[in-house]
Image (cartoon, rainbow, N blue to C red):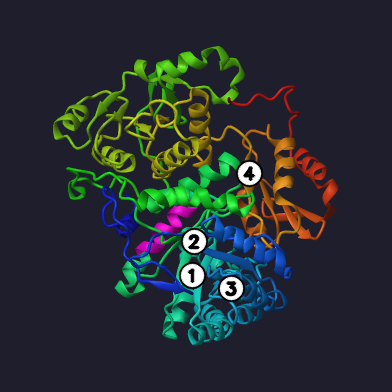
């Protein structure tokens, strides 16, 4: 186990307890402290268009959004926040407004006059990313920090004077060159980037701020937030600032919801998070029901008490800050190899197998691989010393799972199993320990399965999975595979990183994303980023094979990795040019005559 695991991000990994944080007031809405987990979103209209912005704010508030963010690209845009705020209040809406700032300190200073909160990105507030590689001496590094202080301190002073809140929001895709060269493109770099700004705020006795650590990769996002919280605990009890959660560029449809639920839901399950934003490439009002559903289990005391668990008796068997898959021995189950270095397998019941067997030839990569009743899986109560001892005394590797009905949350139950089980035994994960009976709400099943299975997979636990919370066979198979894809443990289709629309977007993200999906959805394992502007585009390109980024109104820049290679392409030609670029790099194959999807 890596020594960094000695850091604590959660007081008890086997019981739910919400992290204690101070209250930060955003207008009349309290975040952190004893407040419920707040739901927020972002409008997409041009900030200069007052009527359009006001309408979107009012629509979001009517949908249940508690905090609304508006982009302010320049001081001119920021100045119009005065008109937007005035008209929103005149309509009787008191929802707090937040200015989203990138690159322009003067825009932040203007925006703070009119809105209740300012979001700054420490990666680009005082830095322009050049992707330069250089070594910083300690003296040079301190000079850089002093330059940042000179840029950032006036905003801190103004927010303190006007009673404004602030979010210090690090994005994985926009770390400064200074951070990249000293800490790398890592969760540690993300945390240190935020701490640079937080230390300046604290030096000025300003504490009305929250943190965020967003990334498009749920694994990176989870590790960064865990490390942030652990470092805050290490700094002292007065560093108990609230946390804003979000997976940036999550995408749309089921994939966007699954990716968001893995990242946000797993952290909520560990008690981390005081406000959330689900970032979907859809109309912003569709984000609100998803976000509300994600936070609901943590408001109504529905998290099961994990009776009989004593974390002190269980040894942490993995490093929660660095992803490593749990070691296990390889074995054959129903003619399929699992465990060891084998891919994570999909299991289903005999009933669901039989219901869909006649369609298996149409399911492509969505087929289940193992029948539960024929798997010889050993189902146990991980709290039982006798049952665990019997398993661990076995010399041969056995497939093991948690017995249905054990009164624990799945995340806690399977963590306890992993802590206590000898590593030679592979583990079958379940999304719920109470299989669905009859019809269920698909979104509820999707979010719960993504949270529970995704959290465990991102912990490196699991050699096979079964989705028991969704009763429809075809949907349960698709859900299983999509969770594996979103968690990054089994890639079987094209992967998309797509940002939500905002006022900075330079083309219609929803229609463009769908057009790109239609043209490239058969490219198994290729990762394509669709970004509306350059704020996070270049950085997020590092995780993608190819990027489609808005460069100017009606013009597209194409990337290979994080390197721009084609510039100012007319939007109507850009998808074809993207296909040409994929072909140039030998990753294009013709689409099958008929592409089948899972029912």
Res 234 visible:
yes
Spatial distance from mark 2 to mark 1, Cα to Cα?
Answer: 8 Å
> Which circle's residue, 2 or 4, is located before the other in the chain?
2
Q: Which of these two is toward me, 95 or 527? A: 95
Give the residue at mark 4. 496
> Which circle's residue, 2 or 3, is located before the other in the chain?
3
Spatial distance from mark 2 to mark 3, Cα to Cα?
Answer: 31 Å
Above or below, comparing residue 577 to residue 371 in the picture: below
* Crowding near the residue tagged with mark 3, few <14, some 14–19, many ≥20 C-alpha atoms within 10 Å: some
> In the image, is 457 to the left or to the right of 415?
right
Q: Which mark is residue 213?
A: 2
Between circles 3 and 1, the one closer to the viewer is 3
Spatial distance from mark 3 to mark 1, Cα to Cα?
Answer: 32 Å
Spatial distance from mark 3 to mark 4, Cα to Cα?
Answer: 38 Å
Q: Which of these two is toward me, 174 or 14? A: 14
* Crowding near the residue tagged with mark 1, few <14, some 14–19, many ≥20 C-alpha atoms within 10 Å: many
> Which circle's residue, 3 or 4, is located before the other in the chain?
3
Q: Which mark is residue 268?
A: none
Q: Which mark is residue 194?
A: 1
In the picture as drawn, the residue positioned furthest to the left comes out as: 386
User: Tag 2's secondary structure?
Assistant: strand
Give the residue at mark 3. 89
**Residue 569, magenta (yes or no):** no
> Which circle's residue, 3 or 1, is located before the other in the chain?
3
Above or below, comparing residue 204 to residue 302 in the picture: below
Q: Which residues lie in the magenta part? A: 220-230
Residue 368 picture location, percent across and down:
48, 22
């Amino acid at each position: 186990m890596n020594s960094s695991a000695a850091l604590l991000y959660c007081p008890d990994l086997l019981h739910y307890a919400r992290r204690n944080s101070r209250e930060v007031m955003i207008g009349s809405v309290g975040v952190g402290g004893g407040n419920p987990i707040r739901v927020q979103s972002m409008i997409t209209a041009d900030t200069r268009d007052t009527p359009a912005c006001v309408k979107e704010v009012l629509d979001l508030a009517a949908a249940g959004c508690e905090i609304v963010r508006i982009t302010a690209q320049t001081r001119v845009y920021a100045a119009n926040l005065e008109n937007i705020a005035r008209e929103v209040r005149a309509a009787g809406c008191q929802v707090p407004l937040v200015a989203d700032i990138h690159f322009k300190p003067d825009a932040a200073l203007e925006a703070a006059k009119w809105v209740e909160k300012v979001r700054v990105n420490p990666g680009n507030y005082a830095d322009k990313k050049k992707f330069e590689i250089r070594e910083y001496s300690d003296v040079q590094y301190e000079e850089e920090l002093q330059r940042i202080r000179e840029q950032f301190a006036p905003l801190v002073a103004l927010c303190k004077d006007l009673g404004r809140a602030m979010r210090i929001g690090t994005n994985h895709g926009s770390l400064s060159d200074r951070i990249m060269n000293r800490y790398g493109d890592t969760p540690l770099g993300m945390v240190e980037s935020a701490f640079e700004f937080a230390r300046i705020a604290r030096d000025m006795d300003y504490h009305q701020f929250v943190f965020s650590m967003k990334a498009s990769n749920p694994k990176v996002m989870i590790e960064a937030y865990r490390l942030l919280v652990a470092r805050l605990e290490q700094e002292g009890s007065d560093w108990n600032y609230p946390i804003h959660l979000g997976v940036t560029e999550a995408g749309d449809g089921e994939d966007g919801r699954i990716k968001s639920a893995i990242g946000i839901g797993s952290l909520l399950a560990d008690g981390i998070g005081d406000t959330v934003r689900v970032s979907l490439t859809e109309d912003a009002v569709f984000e609100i029901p998803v976000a509300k559903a994600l936070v609901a289990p943590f408001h109504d005391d529905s998290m099961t008490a994990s009776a009989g668990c004593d974390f002190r008796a269980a040894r942490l068997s993995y490093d929660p800050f660095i992803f490593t898959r749990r070691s296990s021995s390889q074995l054959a189950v129903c003619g399929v190899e699992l465990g060891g270095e084998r891919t994570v397998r999909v299991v289903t019941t005999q009933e669901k197998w039989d219901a869909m067997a006649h369609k298996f030839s149409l399911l492509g990569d969505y087929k289940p691989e193992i029948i539960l009743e024929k798997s010889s899986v050993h189902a146990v109560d991980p709290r039982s010393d006798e049952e665990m001892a019997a398993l661990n005394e076995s010399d041969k590797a056995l497939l093991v799972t948690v017995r249905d009905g054990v009164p624990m949350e799945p995340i806690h139950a399977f963590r306890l199993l992993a802590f206590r089980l000898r590593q030679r035994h592979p583990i079958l994960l379940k999304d719920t320990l109470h299989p669905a009976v009859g019809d269920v709400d698909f979104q509820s099943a999707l979010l719960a399965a993504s949270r529970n299975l995704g959290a465990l997979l991102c912990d490196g636990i699991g050699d096979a999975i079964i989705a028991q919370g969704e009763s429809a066979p075809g949907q349960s198979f698709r859900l299983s595979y999509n969770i594996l894809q979103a968690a990054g443990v089994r890639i079987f289709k094209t992967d998309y990183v797509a940002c939500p629309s905002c006022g900075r977007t330079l083309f219609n993200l929803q229609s463009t994303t769908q057009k790109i999906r239609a043209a490239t959805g058969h490219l198994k394992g290729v990762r394509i980023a669709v970004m509306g502007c350059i704020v996070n585009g270049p950085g997020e390109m590092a995780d993608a094979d190819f990027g489609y980024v808005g460069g100017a109104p009606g013009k597209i820049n194409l990337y290979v990795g994080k390197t721009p290679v084609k510039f100012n392409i007319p939007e109507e030609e850009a998808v074809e040019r993207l296909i040409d670029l994929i072909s140039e790099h030998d990753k294009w194959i013709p689409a099958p005559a008929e592409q089948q999807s899972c029912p």
